[in-house]
Amino acid sequence: MKYSQATDYALHVMLYLVAAAPDKPVGVAVLAERMGVSQTYLSKMLTKLVKAGLIQSVSGANGGYRLRRNWDDISFLDVIHAIEGTASMFECSLDHGSECLVQQVVAQAEQQLEQFLDSKKIADLAEQFKAGS
Amino acid sequence: MKYSQATDYALHVMLYLVAAAPDKPVGVAVLAERMGVSQTYLSKMLTKLVKAGLIQSVSGANGGYRLRRNWDDISFLDVIHAIEGTASMFECSLDHGSECLVQQVVAQAEQQLEQFLDSKKIADLAEQFKAGS
DNA sequence: GAGCGACTACTCGGATACATAGTGTCCGAGTGTTCAGGG
DNA sequence: CCCTGAACACTCGGACACTATGTATCCGAGTAGTCGCTC
């Protein structure tokens, strides 16, 4: 039970984009340099973020990745779902007669977790980030 | 981000032990039959539960696995930690100058999640389970 | 000097290997029961 | 009838393959800017 490293990178990329360049497109090279990860691998995650509709890609010279219009409403949960997928983190594989009580409890916990993560917006963190640095 | 299937099995085993046989040792064969999983694989998880101190093993004929004394205080979190390990579910791999804000938020979420899971005792669920069946 | 066209440099994106963790299985070591034989 | 002892059946536990997911990489397709040539 661990969030993948990809999620880590994706969250930091989003934070960087919101805090430093909410309007201009940023190339992979710059982001990869800052994250300390290879460009080609990072682009894989960025592709996921594009497909999830969180950012958009700009081709050609001086291109890169840019935030979408409503970037100030993007939450941690959005990013996590984009990378990890939206599947539930617990699926009972047994066939009970009735509903699985274990499943219910964990699902409840998950719902609470997602609610918390959805309330945390990247933009809020960026404010804090800029103030601290 | 998903709990492993092993956690699923372990939780169901604990629920079964608490609800059906809090005192008598139960062999792997019975548990595996009920769970629909091979005996040898299930014993692997049971070993983890033993090492975590949640249950104890009884060797020899008519042996098996039995709950420990304070079984009525075992929570979901105990079982999950025994199987999944106690490692944090998010570790920032970058070297920031200051503390990582992303890390802080996710750690906060995790803490809340664990608090919830720790409040859910297996014994409580067993009451509900017995009442329903 | 202005417009057009091809070239070049830069970008993203999918297709392709490698490592690690989870899943599943096999077989050996240890322990308590049981049953038979002797006192 | 009771005690002793060995054989047996059952248990757990570690060591061994297989699969799936995550991690990392390479190379090709496409696009926009740019430079030179022509009118």
Image (cartoon, coloured by chain):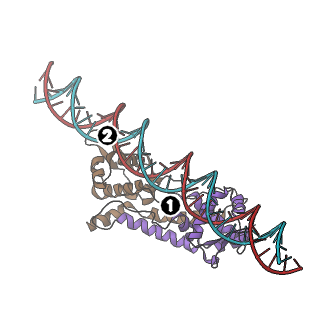
Chain colours: A purple, B brown, C red, D cyan
* Marks 1 and 2 on same chain: yes
Where B116 falls versus C15 (above or below)?
Answer: below
Residue underneath mark 2:
B59
Front position in the image: A69 or C2: C2
**Where residue A80 appears, x then y in whole percent?**
55, 66
Query: What amino acid is found at the position of numbered circle 2 in the picture?
Result: Ser
Tag 2's secondary structure?
Answer: loop
- Residue, x 30% and y 59% (percent of image)? B19
Tell me the subunit letter for badge 2.
B
Front position in the image: A76 or A61: A61
Residue underneath mark 1:
B1
**Where residue A108 appears, x then y in whole percent?**
43, 69
**Sequence-first tag of 1 and 2:** 1
Tell me the subunit letter for badge 1.
B
Distance from Cα at disc 1 to Cα at disc 2: 37 Å
Q: Residues within 10 Å of mark 2 (few under 14, many from 20)?
A: few
